[in-house]
Image (spheres, rainbow, N blue to C red):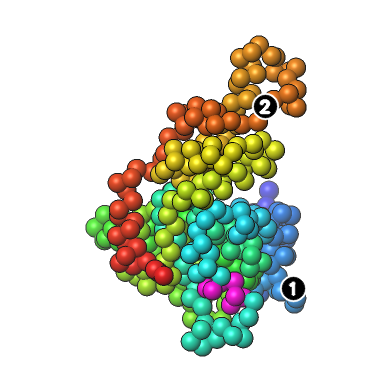
Amino acid sequence: GVSRRGFRGNFVPPIKSNGNNARNISARNAGKYDDSLDDSTKKCLEILCGPDGELPEKLRNLEPRLIEHVSNEIMDKDPNVRWDDIAGLEHAKKCIDEMVIYPLQRPDIFMGCRSPGRGLLLFGPPGTGKTMIGKAIAGEAKATFFYISASSLTSKWIGEGEKLVRALFGVASCRQPAVIFVDEIDSLLSQRKSDGEHESSRRLKTQFLIEMEGFDSGSEQILLIGATNRPQELDEAARRRLTKRLYIPLPSSEARAWIVRNLLQKDGLFKLSNEEMDIICNLTEGYSGSDMKNLVKDASMGPLREALKQGIEITKLKKEDMRTVTLQDFENALREVRPSVSPNELGAYDQWNEQFGSLS
Ligand code: ADP
């Protein structure tokens, strides 16, 4: 075999393997990456290269597999949600137009005193459309959308969260304008302090704040959106960076009606009178947008369940013979689908909104 003994028989350590996917793209080879990388990883990196064929400064020294993960799993090039898909929330939509959409359309007007904030917090009970808003912002602004759940940084990416955060902001800066949506941001930027706090999660938090600081001062077109149902957990540093804080409340009666109508109409199943719609709205006080969706889903099973009960075989069932969805279907569904937010949780949101929210 090949002798590992060198000159004078000294021990020569084995040569480091080249075929290591985890190798960094070092500054030494100035953006020229390893030939031994997977084709998919290479393709990913190639897309991010500038016109000179070099990988941007920010992405050097990052592990290719993390860049690939950000590009494939976190980035969404075409989030197909628009403002019109979101029921209600007029106040939030207006604020966001002013903060994000208009500045992108007219950067010349939004300069100096008018330069937009780069951090937005959406808070409120779960299932009220916060994620939808994030996607719609990216859709409306023709921006690249990045979605990450902060709890995955600490649970799934144990010990690597910091590196992943760097890769995330690095790729976003190559993909401007960009919207970075951080779900459950409280788990990342909470005020629970030192003793119980692990060293690694403290480092992760610091890294995150550094990255935010970085694009906040610069001319980069990156918007960070944090979403939380526990705004009380955020500390002062987090609040300072998330300058606009919008309460995303439970849907109003009109918004609930809109969701029902919209979902049923899409499937050609809508045939309820205004009076019936009013009854449904009255019975769904306290339901979130996501509860409403589940309710509609269950109600729309009504006609099918009925046909099966009459003994019609599922294989012989004709779509055109099935009736549309009725008030009775909704009344049955209301027994199955209960509201997921308890009314006594709402006071805390109002209170936090009064103190820290962007009211108008
Ligand atoms: P959150 O991020 O606030 O927890 P999501 O945006 O993920 O909630 O909403 C979950 C689902 O509930 C959406 O995919 C949508 O179907 C429905 N939904 C929630 N809020 C609304 C809304 N305001 N308008 C229309 N659909 C909504």
In terms of image quadrants, where is residue 104?
bottom right
Q: Which residue in the structure is indicated by mark 2? A: 323
Label disc, if present, on residue 296 of the rendered structure? none
For this orientation, the residue located farthest to the front is 275
Horizontal side of residue 306 vs 42, given as left or right: left
Question: Residue at coordinates 56% horizontally, 83% vertically from top-left?
Answer: 110
Question: Residue at coordinates 59% horizontally, 38% vertically from top-left?
Answer: 273
Residue 127: x %, y % from top left: 47, 47
Q: Label 2 is placed on what type of residue?
A: Arg
The residues colored magenta run: 98-104
In terms of image quadrants, where is residue 121?
bottom left
Is the magenta region chiefly helix, strand or loop? helix
Can you see residue 5?
Answer: no
Residue 85: x %, y % from top left: 61, 53
Give the vertical position of 152 relative to 63 (above or below).
above
Q: Which residue in the structure is indicated by mark 1? A: 53
